[in-house]
Image (cartoon, coloured by chain):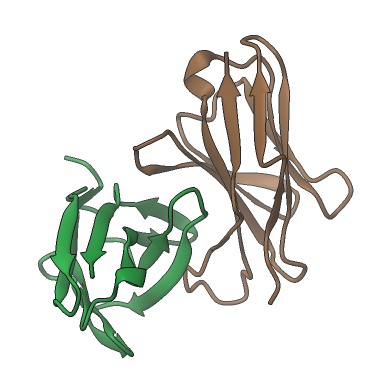
Amino acid sequence: EPEVTQTPSHQVTQMGQEVILRCVPISNHLYFYWYRQILGQKVEFLVSFYNNEISEKSEIFDDQFSVERPDGSNFTLKIRSTKLEDSAMYFCATQTGTVNTGELFFGEGSRLTVL
Amino acid sequence: QKEVEQDPGPLSVPEGAIVSLNCTYSNSAFQYFMWYRQYSRKGPELLMYTYSSGNKEDGRFTAQVDKSSKYISLFIRDSQPSDSATYLCAMNNNNDMRFGAGTRLTVKP
């Protein structure tokens, strides 16, 4: 069964460092998303991406965050200068886009720990 | 008022019990309503989705949507220990999806 793959599974970084989280979407999917989940809290929307551009972003997704799909396969989330409060589980999700059924397929997540 | 409200629990039931999970929402533009199951340290996986008001049944799971009341439910019949997880409601409109906080369910053998 096709799946969304995320790397790394866990990254520990120092405050102020740049972090890149990577996602390989399911091959025929057209919509890509990043969500985050702070430990014990709800899943929060960060950004959606379609046709090589951001289609929507939340207020969490400030200038420290960026997304791109540089090689047509990997979908990346970059945090330029990490803060302690960026510590969370980051989930990539993808959707076919052919019919908007809301069926998002999630990756296993990348746990980010900022020290 | 939060866009999607869901009681985080925790909810603990004996094996075989009927479980009822609920969410309310405020945005009447939501069209698709989903329930995701999330096991510890894993990504959410889609359990059920419905479009507009009504019921949908899949095995032991039944999803209900009442758009007039802005209320959705998930029922689990004959609950099993393997159903122990966090259940998140979600709803969207034009790829703008919002999640509830998730209800942590434990089914005790």
* Farthest front residue in view: B109
Q: Residue at x 20, y 82 (%)?
A: B77
Q: Position of residue A23 (x, y in %)?
A: 72, 49
> Which quadrant, please, contains the C terminus of chain B?
bottom left
Taking the image as shown, residue A2 lies to the left or right of residue A106, namely right
* Vertical relation: B14 (above or below) A72: below
* Vertical relation: A13 (above or below) A71: above
* Vertical relation: A22 (above or below) B88: above
Taking the image as shown, residue A94 lies to the left or right of residue A5, namely left
Q: Colour of chain A?
A: brown
Q: Quadrant of residue A13?
A: top right
Total marks shown come to: 0
Q: Position of residue B107 (x, y in %)?
A: 23, 66
Q: Nearer the viewer, residue B11 or A75?
A: B11
Q: Nearer the viewer, residue B105 or A95?
A: B105
Taking the image as shown, residue B60 lies to the left or right of residue B16, namely right
* Farthest left residue in view: B69
Q: Nearer the viewer, residue A92 or B28?
A: A92
Taking the image as shown, residue B22 lies to the left or right of residue B59, namely left
Q: Quadrant of residue B66?
A: bottom left
Q: Nearer the viewer, residue B15 or B73?
A: B15
Q: Position of residue B57 (x, y in %)?
A: 29, 88
> Which quadrant, please, contains the N terminus of chain B?
top left
* Farthest top residue in view: A16
Q: Position of residue A113 (x, y in %)?
A: 57, 24
Chain that is green in the image: B
Q: Answer whether residue B71 is visible to the viewer in this image.
A: no
Q: Residue at x 43, y 57 (%)?
A: B39
Q: Answer whether residue B7 is visible to the viewer in this image.
A: yes
Q: Residue at x 25, y 47 (%)?
A: B3
